[in-house]
Amino acid sequence: MSRSPRRSPPAPASAPRGSGQVRIIGGRWRGTKLAVPDRPGLRPSSDRVRETLFNWLMPVLPGARVLDLFAGTGALGLEALSRGAAHATLVERDPGLAVALRDACVRLGAQATVVAQDALAWLAGQQVTFDLVFLDPPFADGLWEPALAALQPRLATDAWVYVESPAGTVTPVPPGWALHREGQTRDVRYALYRAPAPQGAGTLRHDDSPATTE
């Protein structure tokens, strides 16, 4: 009586194509890895950019109320919490990414709120203000100007706003904002602005004032 050939056990499921990891680079969760699923437009800020940015932000992070408006992997908002921010609100419209963000926050015990909603629609219904905002939307969507306009009433006095955009572009910002620092890699321009006081939505302008580049 012949025997059926033995079947090999099924191979473990592989990670989604294009998926990877990004790590928290400083603070109490230093070295913690966050998943980067394969999603159109998902492009976490590089280690180099985040290291520079959080060196700039070091004096203002303790106790800050943070908004990560297009959170994606949560790398910016969670990095801020790791380094001493009091609370972070992470807004992400992709349901799968929002679930991953919640899982990460639970795993870390993070003082964070995850909002699974369109960023601009969510902003329209808010009354709270923030000390620090990260604005790094999918580049293809072109949401910098409407997002910055909608952010105006939600900024605390002397709030800081980080803006990331394609290399070679200067995002128009509201009148009165001061460009504190900026830098550029081959792919992105990153800039940190100071918004001196809450204002209503107004005309945006191109900020061509001098700034330090690192």
Image (cartoon, rainbow, N blue to C red):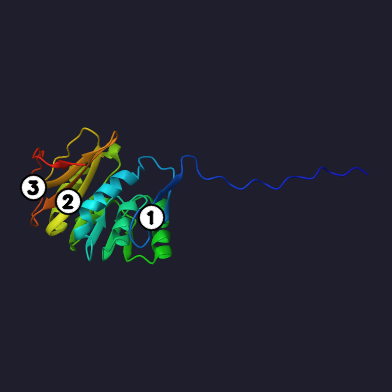
Q: Are marks 3 and 2 in contact (CB under 8 Å)?
A: no
Give the Cα separation between the discs numbered 1 and 2. Answer: 22 Å
The front one of 151 and 34 is: 34
Query: In the figure, is residue 209 to the left or right of 76?
Result: left
Q: Nearer the viewer, residue 189 or 11?
A: 189
- Sequence-first disc among 1 and 2: 1
Could you tell me residue 2's position as x and y percent? 90, 42
Q: Which comes before the other along the chain, label 3 or label 1?
A: 1
Q: Residues within 10 Å of mark 2 (few under 14, many from 20)?
A: many
The circle drawn on residue 202 is 3
Location of residue 89 with respect to 8 vertically, above or below: below
Report the side of 72 relative to 214 (left or right). Answer: right
Helix, strand or loop at mark 2: helix
Residue with the mark numbered 1 = 98
Neighbor class of circle 3 (other Cα within 10 Å; few <14, some 14-19, many 20+) is few
The quarter of the image holding the C terminus is top left
The quadrant where residue 26 appears: bottom left
Residue appearing at x 6%, y 48% in the figure: 176
Q: Residues within 10 Å of mark 1 (few under 14, many from 20)?
A: many
- Amino acid, disc 2: Ala
Q: Which mark is residue 150?
A: 2
For marks 3 and 2, the one nearer the N-term is 2
Secondary structure type for disc 3 = loop
